[in-house]
Amino acid sequence: MSEEGTVTPELEMTELQQRLDEESDRLKKLYSAYEAQEKELIDMKAEIEILEKEIIEREIEKEAQDNLLSRKQNRINELEMSEARVSQRVEHLEPELQKMEEKYSREKDRLGKVFGIAEELDNDLRLAVTELRTRDEWYVDHMGLFEDLNKAIKQRYEMIEKAIEAEKESQHMGRAITEKMEEIIESRAAEMTIEEAEAQIDAESPQTDNASTPEEEEAPAEVSETIQETDASEAPASEAPASENEWNWSESVLAGVMEKHNISDKEGFIEFAKAYDKDNNRYLKGSELGAAALDWVKKEAGEETAEPQESTPSNVAQTEWATNDDPWADA
């Protein structure tokens, strides 16, 4: 075989080595491309994840914006409704606004007048302050005279108060003396009873009107005085004054007189005793009831009843004591 047509092992190994190198270069290039593709794939995956996250965030933002838009729309609707109501209210309040404007104009005019009056008052106040300042200066200059006058007035009032106190003490002493005299009179009147007074009347009354003497007339007068004193002491203090159409008497005195003379007909005796009201005051005193009881007993016994208007020594004494000089006469 010729050298050209013969493949030696060295040559074959060289070719194989070349082919191996070429394939190694290709493989390296492929591996480099693979690594580049793998890196790109990783980058793409990372970018995809980022984009997915962005998509989710965009969806969330979209939902939030949709909610916001819905709220905005609701708010817009509410505002439109409020605007409609306000417009209706404005239409309704326009007449009131006109009235208020008229009132405002009137009040403005009135306020202008008041302001003018206030300015006048302010001017008057300034004048008054000036006058008061002048008066105070004059008062300070003449203060000594006013102090002397004040002292004199105080002395005058002190003298008047002392005189009033002295007069009050005098009146108090007078009242004390009067009360003491009344106590003495009441104690003296309480010493005699109705029975003793009537016994003296029976013992000292004259048998006839013509046989009376000055001494005999004086005794019934004293008895009448004693009876009237007894009536004044026995009359209740709280008894109200008799009216013009009512008769009054002391129940205790009436009961004592009826018991002493054994009189049982109370109503009849009272009607009978009314004729013995000598002073015509429609009040039956003890002396009048005693005289009526004596005549009642005589009447019951069949004796002649004395005339109520007949003037006996006791009645004369009662009439004398019924004058204004009698301190115990009933009002």
Image (cartoon, helix red, strand yellow):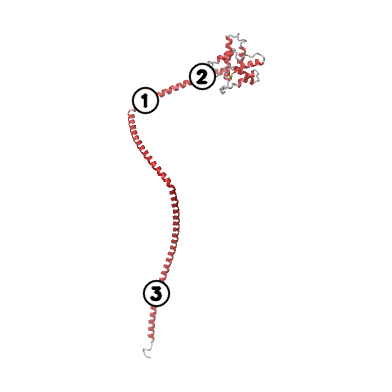
Q: Nearer the viewer, residue 245 or 91?
A: 91
Tags 2 and 1 touching, CB below 8 Å: no
CA gap, disc 3 and disc 1: 133 Å
Mark 2 Cα within 10 Å, few/some/many (few <14, many 20+)?
few
* Residue 201 visible in the picture: yes
Q: Is residue 125 above or below residue 156?
A: below
Earlier sequence position, callout 2 versus callout 1: 1
* Label 3 vs label 1, nearer the camera: 1
Residue at point 41%, 69% (across, down) = 44
Circle 2: element type: helix
Q: Amino acid at mark 1?
A: Leu
The C terminus is located in which quarter? top right
Q: Residue under circle 1?
A: 149
Residue 47 on image: x %, y %:
41, 67
Judge the density around disc 1: few (<14), some (14-19), many (≥20) Cα neighbours within 10 Å: few
For label 3, the residue is 33
At label 3, the amino acid type is Ala
User: Looking at the image, is 157 positioned above or below residue 73?
Assistant: above
Q: Which residue is mark 2?
A: 178
Residue 78 placement (x, y as % from top left):
45, 54
Closer to the camera in the image, 200 or 123: 123
